[in-house]
Amino acid sequence: MTEPLVPPEETPPVEGSTAEAHEERADGGPWEHPGLWVWLVIIGAALVAGYFVARMASLF
């Protein structure tokens, strides 16, 4: 028994699978790159902490 040919852009069916071939979704922009947001939060926290350290140092 021969299997039917599947076009190159389609995923061939797997035995026992009920899933359909699906397109890959587009890039979600900055929401899919949480490392950027983590670094922005870390830099912001360091700036705020630096401000308070500078104020404490000016008291002495």
Image (cartoon, rainbow, N blue to C red):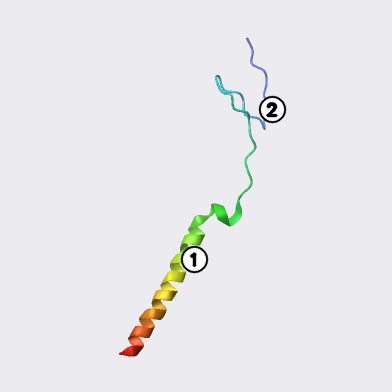
Return the residue at label 2: 7
Label 1 to label 2, Cα distance in Å?
A: 45 Å
Q: Amino acid at mark 1?
A: Leu
Question: Residue at 40% of width from left, 77% of height from top?
Answer: 50
Residue 10 lies in quadrant = top right
Q: Position of residue 57 (x, y in %)?
A: 33, 85
Image x and y of residue 20, in percent? 63, 28
Left or right? Give the position of 27 relative to 52. Answer: right
Left/right of residue 25 with respect to residue 44 in the rendered view: right
Point out the image quarter for the N terminus. top right
Query: Dot 1: few (<14), some (14–19), or many (≥20) neighbours within 10 Å?
Result: few
Question: Residue, x 64% and y 16% (percent of image)?
Answer: 3
Q: Quadrant of residue 42?
A: bottom left
Q: Nearer the viewer, residue 40 or 7?
A: 40
Residue at 68 percent across and 21 percent down: it is 5
**Dot 1 or dot 2, earlier in sequence:** 2
Name the element at disc 1.
helix
Q: Is residue 26 above or below residue 35?
A: above
Of residues 21 and 18, the one nearer the viewer is 18
Foreground label between 1 and 2: 1
Query: Mark 1 = which residue?
Result: 40
Q: Position of residue 53 (x, y in %)?
A: 36, 80
* Label 2 neighbour load within 10 Å: few <14, some 14-19, many 20+: few
Q: Where does residue 26 sit, x and y in percent of width and height?
A: 64, 46
Judge by depth and name the residue closer to the eye, 19 or 12.
19
Say left or right for 34 vs 55: right
